[in-house]
Every structure is written in C-alpha cells, then in structure tokens.
Image (cartoon, rainbow, N blue to C red):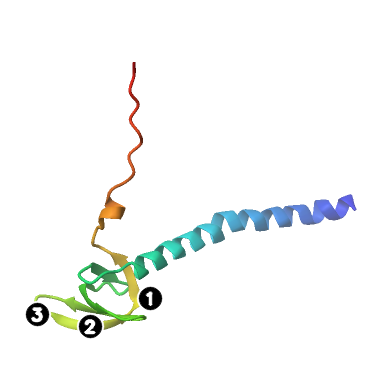
Amino acid sequence: MATILYQFGPIVLIIVLMYFILIRPQKKKEKEVQRMRSSLEIGDEITTIGGIIGRVVSMKEDTIVIETGSDRSKMRLARWAIQTNNTPHEAEAAPAKPAEKTEK
C-alpha cells in the first residue's frame, strides 16, 4: 500500500502543480479578456488580434463595426478578434485608495 503511494504521489503532485502554474492563470486571463470584450462601448478605441486599430461604431451580439484611418473606412469584425481596449474607463482607471489613518 505504501509503495503505491510512493509511486503515484509524485505524479499527483506534479498534476496539482501544473494546474496551479499553467491552467488556473490561463483561465483567469480568459475571463478578463471575455469581460473586456463584453464591456465594449461605442466610441472605444480597440486593437484587433491582427494589429488593426480602430474606433467602435456599432455593435451586435457577436460582431462589431469599426472605423479605421482618416478616410473612415469601416470594417466588420468578430468579437473574438478584439485583443485590447485602448480607451481607459473611469472604473478601471481609478484604483481603490486605502483608508487614510489619522495619528493622535
């Protein structure tokens, strides 16, 4: 019984470590990206996965239309193709300040 534990213990430990080192941070990042894509607003400046920078003009459930360049070219993209939102929003830009302590 103890030999089985010694044989499979390191394997189980490696699997648990791999979960906390690789899988869990990846899932957390995916949730943040999904939250960013769902919180897009008209007028936000975005960057696509392909490197195209544009301003959101209209949105549907799974697609968005962006304007690019000075000639106002419009492109329709899938939401999954958005990499970053370059427009800072007030909720994200204002970090919570710790309560100030007064000394007596």
Tell me the CA gap for discs 3 and 1. 25 Å
Query: Foreground residue, 86 or 3?
Result: 86
Counting residues from the start of the chain, the first of labels 2 and 1 encountered is 2
Q: Residue furthest right?
A: 1
- Number of dots carrying numbers: 3
Q: Which residue is mark 2?
A: 75
Label 1 packing within 10 angstroms: few (<14), some (14-19), many (20+): few
Q: In the rendered structure, are the residues bearing label 2 and label 1 in contact, judged by CB atoms less than 8 Å apart?
A: no
Give the side of residue 63 with respect to residue 34, left or right: left
- Residue 13: give x, y in percent of width and height: 70, 53
- Residue 80, disc: 1
- Residue 5, disc: none
- Residue 73: give x, y in percent of width and height: 15, 82
Amino acid marked by disc 1: Trp
Under circle 3, the secondary element is: loop
Query: Foreground residue, 39 or 65?
Result: 39
Give the side of residue 6 with respect to residue 56, left or right: right
Figure quadrant of the C terminus = top left
Q: Which residue is mark 3?
A: 71
Amino acid marked by disc 3: Asp
- Residue 56: give x, y in percent of width and height: 22, 74
- Residue 58: give x, y in percent of width and height: 24, 79
Residue 12 picture quarter:
bottom right
Residue at left 33%, top 23%?
A: 102
Residue at left 12%, top 79%?
A: 72
Amino acid marked by disc 2: Met
Under circle 2, the secondary element is: strand
Counting residues from the start of the chain, the first of labels 3 and 1 encountered is 3
Residue 54 picture quarter:
bottom left
Give the side of residue 90 with respect to residue 2, left or right: left
Q: Residue furthest top?
A: 104
